[in-house]
Amino acid sequence: MDLGLTGRTAVVTGASRGIGLAIAQALHDEGAHVVLTARREEDAAAAATQVGKRALGIGAHVTDEEAARECLERTLDAFGSIDVLVNNAGTNPAFGSLVQQEHSRFAKTLDVNLWGPTLWTQLATQMWMGEHGGSVVHTSSLGAFAVGPNLAVYHASKAALTHLTRHQAQELGPKIRVNAVAPGVVRTRLAEELWKEHEAAVAADTPLGRIGEPEDIGSAVAFLAGATASWITGETLVIDGGQRWGSGR
């Protein structure tokens, strides 16, 4: 199936590894030019080399407005458009009980997970998409719809991002579509606490019998970003192998 991404330009934040890297690879495989961002330019450049010849790595911390603007300017200089924005960068320094949180960790979680997507969407709209149209995809989490020990702040930030997706879809349509993906437990460094020491048990309680791989998320983002999803906006696609429902065994 042709997703209509050939010749388009996509920017993926937090793309040096894990889900972000898989998203960048999926978009590149569909024919897009892809800009990968990371906090350090050398990490972004190394990831871009891995992705392919139409990829460019740019260093930009997701909450740094000047760096974000410069990244999007370099994208326009290199490829001439910003057709897809994937707000993937995320963090969870506030792992732990709510009654033991510090303001600095709480604020950093919301700054990266909520303000970052707001900032980059705002800039992409002002610099290109507002006039020419485009597609935005946020990386939320299955945790946006769940509760669990030690993850309250992270889950709250992703629940807010899911709701923000609906508001942006309403505000930015019809030229810009805004959607989100909500991964379950995926084999990434950020999610290690959820699977590394007990992968077999997590897989056994998942109807599809395994934890997720970054590529599972990458292909879904490519679908939402492409023309085949042209009448989908304001939605959050849960990708969890059925983890919400349990195995029933």
Image (cartoon, rainbow, N blue to C red):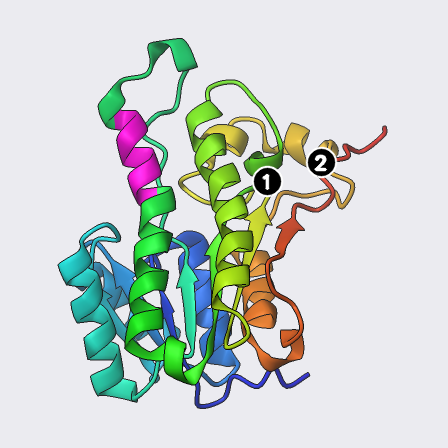
Residue located 27% across and 18% down the image: 102
Q: Secondary structure at mark 2?
A: loop
* Residue under the point 23% across and 50% down: 63
Rendered location of residue 179, percent (x, y): 55, 60
Which region of the structure is painted magenta? 105-112
Asked if labels 1 and 2 touch by Cβ distance under 8 angstroms, the answer is yes
Residue name at image x 61 percent, y 71 percent: 223
Q: Is residue 136 left or right of residue 210?
A: left
Q: Is residue 58 visible?
A: yes
Q: Amino acid at mark 2?
A: Arg
Compute the Cα span from label 2 to label 1. Answer: 8 Å
Image side of residue 200 versus residue 15, left or right:
right
Q: Quadrant of the N terminus?
A: bottom right
Specify whether residue 107 is painted magenta.
yes
- The answer to whether residue 151 shows anywhere in this view is no
Question: Would you identify the image quadrant in which residue 85 lies?
Answer: bottom left
Q: Nearer the viewer, residue 207 or 137?
A: 137
Tell me the crowding category of disc 2: few under 14, some 14 to 19, or many 20 or more residues within 10 angstroms, Cα based. Answer: some
- Of residue 159 and residue 54, the one placed in the foreground of this image is 159
Residue 187 lies left or right of residue 65; in this view the side is: right
Does residue 80 belong to the magenta stretch?
Answer: no
Q: Quadrant of residue 57?
A: bottom left
Q: Which mark is residue 142?
A: 1
Q: Could you tell me what secondary structure mostly forms the magenta stretch?
A: helix
From the viewer's perspective, is residue 185 above or below residue 9?
A: above
**Residue in view at x 52 percent, y 38 percent:** 159
> Where does the image place residue 190, in percent across and percent down from the top left?
41, 39
Residue reaching furthest top? 99
Name which of mark 2 and mark 1 comes first in the sequence. 1
Q: Amino acid at mark 1?
A: Leu
- For disc 2, the marked residue is 244
